[in-house]
Image (cartoon, helix red, strand yellow):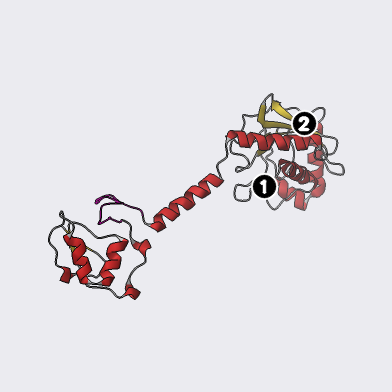
Amino acid sequence: MSVSYPAIGRDTKLTRYVLFHPEAEHHCQSGNDIVANIITNLDTLSAISATSIRPLPPSKAPPFSYFSRAYNLEGSRFPLGKAHRSPTQTQSQHQHSRIHNQHAISPIMSSKRIAKELTEVTTTPPTGMTITLARDSDLHAWHVSLTGPENTPYAGGTFAVLVDLPKDYPFKAPVVKFATRIYHPNITNDANGNICLGMLKSENWKPATKLAAVLEAVRSLLVEPLPDDPLEARIADEFKNNRPEFEKNAKQYVTRYAKGPASFAASEAPAK
């Protein structure tokens, strides 16, 4: 079977073996006699006329990265018939491996990071918060008791906030939810208590972000809701267009759900 070698010329044909090798490409530019010497040293190759291979000007020679396979004509480095990756392919694979490794973290390293942050927030807790572990010896599930900020409709209430840290934290954002029902445009008005917080979105999350900053951002939502990025469109519209009605409803939720110690009964399994 004959195959074309586009790097040499359209009308060039090589029989049985294609000379995809930097040395072959180099010699084809150097002269026909050298190509003939290479080919005659290979017992397994069919006869081929050296005059059928035209030298190419160096300026037209393709970069080595064009070669998707290389065959060693001397048989020392890569045996004939075995594929060899080009430098461009190898570099691409190394780059992919490097990126993958950057986002890989061992359970021990993740636990060390979490333990350090837990020490920080329990030693110097964010304003109005008390942080404990949801389960003994499980660093990945936190219970946060959040006191409603003063001068907001949430004042006088105590809210249970769940923080679940995935196994590959900090390369994956924590999952933060309200276990206490709350009337808020950025928190689902149901038992799930999902939060819409920009910094926790996968496209925005940064591994350098500390959990203390996350908790402070959650509290800031109670002080200043973000009605333009809502989870509850109706409540967001009410917040923007009928603030007194919004505040009345928010206070009613505090009276109904957030009086007394924070209850974590709705605690869910840790994030995967």
State the residue in front, 62 or 35: 35
Q: Which quadrant: the C terminus?
A: top right
Which type of secondary structure does the marked residue at label 1 adopt? loop
The image shows residue 271, relative to residue 8, as above or below, that is above
Please name whichever residue, 140 or 95, is drawn nearer the observer in this view of the structure. 95
* In the depicted structure, whether residue 243 falls above or below residue 132: below
- Three-letter residue code for mark 2: Tyr
Q: Is residue 222 left or right of residue 106?
A: right
Q: Which residues are magenta?
A: 70-85
Asked if residue 84 is among those painted magenta in the image, a careful observer would answer yes
Residue 148 can be seen, yes or no: yes
Total marks shown come to: 2
Q: Is residue 193 visible?
A: no
> Going by the picture, which residue comes out furthest to the right?
151
Q: Residue, x 77% and y 37% (percent of image)?
A: 121
Indicate the position of residue 203 as horizontal and vertical percent values.
Answer: 60, 50
> Residue 196 at x, y = what percent?
67, 45
Q: Disc 2 to disc 1, how far (Cα)?
A: 35 Å
Disc 2, SS: helix
Q: Choose top left, top right, bottom left or bottom right for residue 219.
A: top right
Give the residue pinned by disc 1: 208
